[in-house]
Image: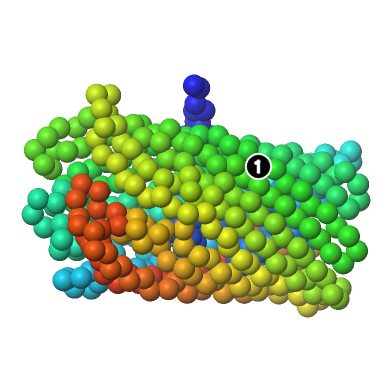
């Protein structure tokens, strides 16, 4: 099997300031905020033909934006989480709690109805970090299994081509190049890291009918093959080469947009995320298995409601709400990804200055507290066992700014 090898210099050249996100604030380790307009509308843009920031959600929207466009945006994320384990004390995570999530887009539409776009963003990310002895059950013989740092840093380079079938309909096809720059899976005594890449595809469809729009966007699951190191010197062993595979889920989004009056747009989206692909991570050396993590997540449906309101020809207001259930069952809960159901509330605005457009947004993520009360004894596989019993709390907020220009 041949695996795509992406040149790291290309990443730096394509977007010098791009540093992929490393936290989770949607279900699982999904990061759906791939444009500032999307953040403002709670990511309900898959059927939108007016916002340039809808293209990363549904590349079929390329066909509805004339000329050449360039957009660069950032979401600043503040993220706090804490755990109060059974038999222990409340401990706040010690990882970074503030990040910038960049996103970039360049598009062009020709006279023949064929359009192109290059998208660069980070649709997934994770970081959790705990000090030693956070979880009392790991003391003693299980000490080598206690989680320390878990991190996923990745970037998606996504070229697309679109075709405008007629004045009201368009289709798009693209390739997703997932580059995992850093996968870290440390325990308090063992350091595990790796990097690698994989490739998938995406398709989109968009149709306008009078005051209604229908949008459909699908992105395939992507398997990334990773290589790195397993450093067990902390338990008196050695450093060996390691291999693993990490599969990112498929995503199917369907949206309907209704414009009851010229100045108001209302959109309802549903996303099916194929989290069942996140099953077991096996980390192996050339001579055999080293360790594994069993997750057995479930597929999820996320519901999004977004609004756009045109205050005047140059200024728009956006706001939205999303309900995002967790794919992580109690039976396989892991403190490495302390996920829970959450609700997203967002607001933002955009202003047009001649050929320039400025957008800004704010989102608050209300994450449910999660209490784990397992009766399963802890062993070589701590997920879903009493080792992680306790209360988990999280809070997230995002502030976004983007600028775009039409040529």
> Can you give x and y, in whole percent of width and height, for residue 330 in the image?
36, 62
> Which residue position holds label 1?
202
Residue that sits furthest to the bottom in the current view: 311
Of residues 150 and 52, the one nearer the viewer is 150
Residue 339: image quadrant is bottom left
> What colour scheme was applied to this rendering of the protein?
rainbow
363 to the left or right of 81: right
Q: Residue at x 76, y 75 (%)?
A: 309
Viewer-nearest residue: 167 or 348:
167
Q: Residue at x 58, y 63 (%)?
A: 302
For the view shown, which residue lies furthest in the top direction?
A: 1
Which percent across, then down, holds residue 28?
45, 57
Is residue 25 found left or right of 41 in the rendered image?
left
Task: Residue 315: tell me if it is visible.
Answer: no
Q: Identify the residue shown where x is 63% and y is 67%.
A: 304
Question: Residue pushed farthest front?
Answer: 375
The quarter holding residue 340 reads bottom left
Q: Is residue 32 visible?
A: yes
Residue 369 coordinates in the image, percent (x, y): 38, 74
**Is 23 situated left or right of 30 in this image?**
left
Q: Is residue 1 above or below residue 224?
A: above
Q: Residues within 10 Å of mark 1 (few under 14, many from 20)?
A: many
> How many dots with numbers?
1
Q: Could you tell me residue 212's position as x and y percent?
A: 84, 64
Q: Secondary structure at mark 1?
A: strand
Q: Is residue 346 left or right of residue 379?
A: right
93 vs 296: above or below: below
The answer to whether 392 is drawn above or below residue 152 in the figure is below
């Amino acid at each position: 099997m041949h695996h795509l090898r992406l040149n790291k210099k290309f990443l730096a050249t394509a977007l010098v300031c791009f540093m992929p996100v490393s936290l989770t604030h949607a279900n699982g380790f999904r990061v759906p905020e791939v444009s500032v307009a999307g953040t403002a509308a709670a990511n309900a843009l898959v059927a939108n033909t007016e916002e340039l920031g809808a293209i990363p959600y549904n590349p079929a929207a390329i066909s509805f934006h004339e000329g050449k466009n360039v957009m660069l945006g950032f979401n600043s994320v503040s993220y706090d989480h804490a755990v109060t384990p059974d038999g222990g004390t409340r401990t706040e995570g010690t990882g970074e709690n503030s990040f910038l999530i960049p996103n970039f887009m360049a598009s062009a539409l020709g006279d023949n109805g064929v359009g192109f776009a290059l998208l660069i963003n980070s649709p997934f990310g994770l970081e959790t970090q705990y000090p030693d002895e956070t979880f009392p059950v790991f003391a003693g013989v299980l000490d080598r299994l206690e989680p320390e740092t878990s991190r996923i840093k990745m970037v998606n380079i996504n070229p697309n081509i679109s075709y405008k079938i007629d004045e009201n309909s368009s289709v798009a096809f693209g390739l997703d190049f997932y580059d995992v720059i850093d996968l870290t899976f440390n325990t308090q005594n063992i350091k595990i890291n790796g990097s690698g890449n994989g490739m998938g595809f995406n398709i989109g469809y968009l149709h306008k009918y009078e005051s209604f729009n229908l949008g459909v966007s699908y992105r395939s699951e992507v398997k990334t093959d990773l290589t790195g190191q397993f450093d067990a010197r902390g338990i008196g062993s050695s450093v060996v080469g390691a291999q693993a595979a990490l599969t990112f889920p498929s995503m199917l989004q369907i949206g309907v947009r209704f414009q009851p009056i010229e100045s108001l747009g209302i959109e309802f989206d549903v996303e099916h995320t194929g989290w069942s692909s996140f099953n077991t991570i096996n980390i192996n050396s050339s001579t055999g298995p080293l360790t594994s993590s069993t997750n057995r997540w479930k597929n999820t449906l996320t519901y999004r409601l977004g609004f756009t309101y045109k205050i005047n020809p140059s200024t728009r207001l956006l706001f939205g709400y999303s309900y995002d259930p967790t794919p992580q069952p109690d039976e396989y809960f892991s403190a490495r990804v302390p996920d829970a159901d959450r609700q997203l509330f967002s607001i933002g605005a955009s202003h047009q200055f001649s050929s320039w457009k400025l957008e800004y947004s704010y989102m608050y993520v209300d994450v449910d507290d999660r209490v784990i009360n397992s009766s399963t004894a802890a062993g070589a596989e701590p997920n879903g066992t009493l080792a992680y019993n306790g209360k988990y709390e999280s809070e997230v907020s995002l502030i976004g700014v983007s600028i775009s220009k039409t040529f």
